Amino acid sequence: MKKIISLLVILFFVSCTLQNRIAPESFKGNYTYVDSKQFLKIEILDNNAITIEKKVEANRVKCIGNYKIISKKKIKVNCMDERNMHEANSIIDFVPLRFDIKNERVYLGSNIIKYKNLILKKE
């Protein structure tokens, strides 16, 4: 009887841990939010890589980094402004508005991503 109970406990534990895993292929792709004031594009790539592009003043800036799967519906994003990776060559490169993200949570849905107060749709 003890063996059956311990087997059931193990099966329950394994099934619970498997439910918290998500297939990364299911949410990979391009997600976009555009309105008259804002532009935001998130691209989820292979090997936990991510790029986030947004409009800052009149320019588009890109943040390049990675993500970590937290749960079935959440990932944690860390990325750095791509201008930090190159030498400054123009006045635009000296703009103090950098687009860096640290430990930002992104919520996943069915063909959508919720980032801050925005809902991005999959292309």
Image (spheres, rainbow, N blue to C red):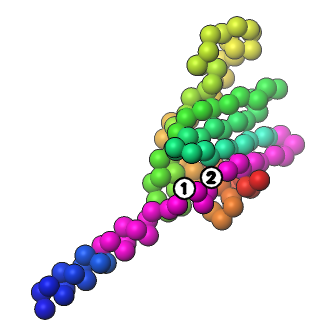
- Indicate which disc residue 24 carries: 1
Q: Secondary structure at mark 2?
A: loop
Q: Quadrant of residue 82?
A: top right
Residue 51 at x, y = what percent?
A: 63, 38
The N terminus sits in image quarter: bottom left
In the foreground, 84 or 94: 84
- State which quadrant residue 86 falls in: top right
Q: Which residue is mark 2?
A: 28
Q: Is residue 81 left or right of residue 2?
A: right
Q: Amino acid at mark 2?
A: Lys
Crowd rating for badge 1 (residues with CA inside 10 Å; few <14, some 14–19, many 20+): few
**Total numbered circles:** 2
Instruction: Please say if 10 is above or below 47.
Output: below
Q: CA distance from mark 2 to mark 1?
A: 6 Å
Picture coordinates of residue 40, whole percent (x, y): 73, 42
55 displayed left or right of 14: right
From the viewer's side, name the closer residue of 66 and 45.
45
The part of the chain drawn in magenta is 13-37
| 20 drawn magenta | yes
Q: Position of residue 8 (x, y in %)?
A: 25, 83
Mark 1: which amino acid?
Answer: Pro
Q: Is residue 7 magenta?
A: no
Q: Is residue 77 visible?
A: no
The residue positioned farthest toward the right in the image shown: 36
- Taking the spot 45% from the left edge, 62% from the top edge, the residue there is 21
Query: Quick one: which residue is furthest to the left in this view?
Result: 2
Secondary structure under the numbered disc 1 in the rendered image: helix
Kindly identify which numbered label has been placed on residue 111. none
Residue at image coords 31%, 78%: 12
